[in-house]
Image (cartoon, rainbow, N blue to C red):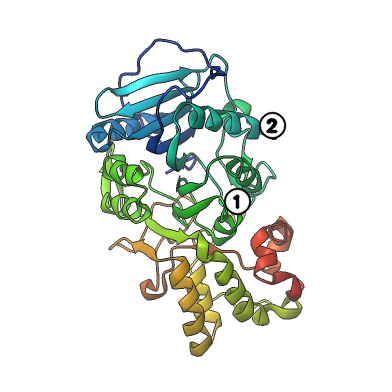
Amino acid sequence: MKRLGLYLIIIYNVVMLSCCHDSLVPPEGPSRDEAERTVIVYMAGDNSLSPAIRLDTTEMARAKSLIPENVNFILYIDDKTRMPALYELSAKNGMQLLVQYEEEHCSTDSLTMLSTLRDIVYLCPARHYGITFWSHATGWAPLRKSARRNTYGKDETYEGTKRSEMEISDLRDILSQLPHFDYIFFDACFMQCIEVAYELRNVTDYMVGSPAEIPGPGAPYDKVVGALCQGNARGIVEGYDAGYPATYSGYYYKGVLLSCIDCAQLEPLAEATGRFLTPHFMERKAPSTQGFQAYSSYLNKYTHYFDMRTTMRRLLSDEDYAVWMQFFDKAVPLRTLSDTRTWFANFCKVPFVDDPDCYGGVSMFVPLEEYEAYGWNKDFSHTSWYEAAGWPTTGW
């Protein structure tokens, strides 16, 4: 899902109430009692994915009975068909309009996102929070067409402006001003990379997503709504995985690659990775990447997004790899791989996992000379992971 090649037309059969509400949050106290959890689904769909919102919200509505009374299930929807709005889905009332914004939003603008998420937290206070980010995405890597790096989301209404995509460092800064999240679920391509996870390690307990492109229809929300409401990161992965292979609108999607990252374990993993990996790259050495599992092969648009575990297995000795895996298993306690060993792909010529025994479910960047022309090595040097994993000592 969430790539520009999506051609999905679904009839929208979720009825949204047409009444309008003031977009300003009242200055008085919260409008409801504190819930056990507020689930936020942030759908930045003012782009080619706009029709897919109809499919996914229909799936959510189908699973409304799984939403407990003490859970707020809130959707922010910005698509091409209407002004942005907040909706609430509940078992009792179905889908209801909560706040109708009166002006167009750039949903990937930092101030807009922060203001919107603060509205939700204010209106729907809770002891726990979980958030789903739904849109296009490029993981840590630069989207070359816009010459920006580390991007989540795309707002085509503002395409061509510096706000039309959001850098991960900006997303981190926004989320750090909000209550801590039990999980962040990226229903967006390429987001399950170690560079993004490390950037967000202090704002969430768990991160769920795919290291590759995801299927056109995205998550089967009728299978994950329950886990979203429970704050169950493992359940999100397992529910998503259970939905594939599948056929949507006449198109067969063979599978999806997924994992769950325990953010509390990322700093030890960074130290271990630097200790074992950087000696292979000292003085700008570039070992052969033969046998590395790549999740992209269109280098005019993206880096390779090498599978982290496979990369370490190819480079390290058996002894070093065994020690490193102790840290990786703690940081990535769950990864799923479809029986087909393949995934939906527009930007990978051979979307097939060659070595399932070494599949890690998380991608990583490996600096290479061939990337110099694209500027990716320089972009990588601006990530927090670059510093934490000891890359400056290598000369890259």
Residue wearing tag 1: 301
Disc 2 crowd, CA 10 A, few/some/many (<14, 14-19, 20+)? few
Nearer to me, 14 or 252: 14
Residue, x 67% and y 59% (percent of image)?
384
Nearer to me, 253 or 166: 166
Residue 47 in sight = no
Residue wearing tag 2: 161
Residue 358 in sight = yes
Quarter occupied by residue 337: bottom left
Residue type highlighted by circle 2: Thr
Residue, x 72% and y 61% (percent of image)?
381
Classify 355 as above or below 204.
Answer: below
- Marks 2,1: beta carbons within 8 A: no
Mark toward the viewer: 2 or 1:
2
Residue 80: give x, y in percent of width and height: 48, 23
| Circle count | 2
Residue 152: give x, y in percent of width and height: 56, 43
- The span from disc 2 to disc 1 (Cα, nearest Å) is 19 Å
Element on which disc 1 rests: loop
Classify 70 as above or below 23.
Answer: below
Residue, x 41% and y 74% (percent of image)?
358
**Farthest-out residue, top:** 19
Q: Is residue 313 left or right of residue 333?
A: right
Indicate which disc, 2 or 1, sits on the residue closer to the N terminus: 2
Mark seen at residue 131: none
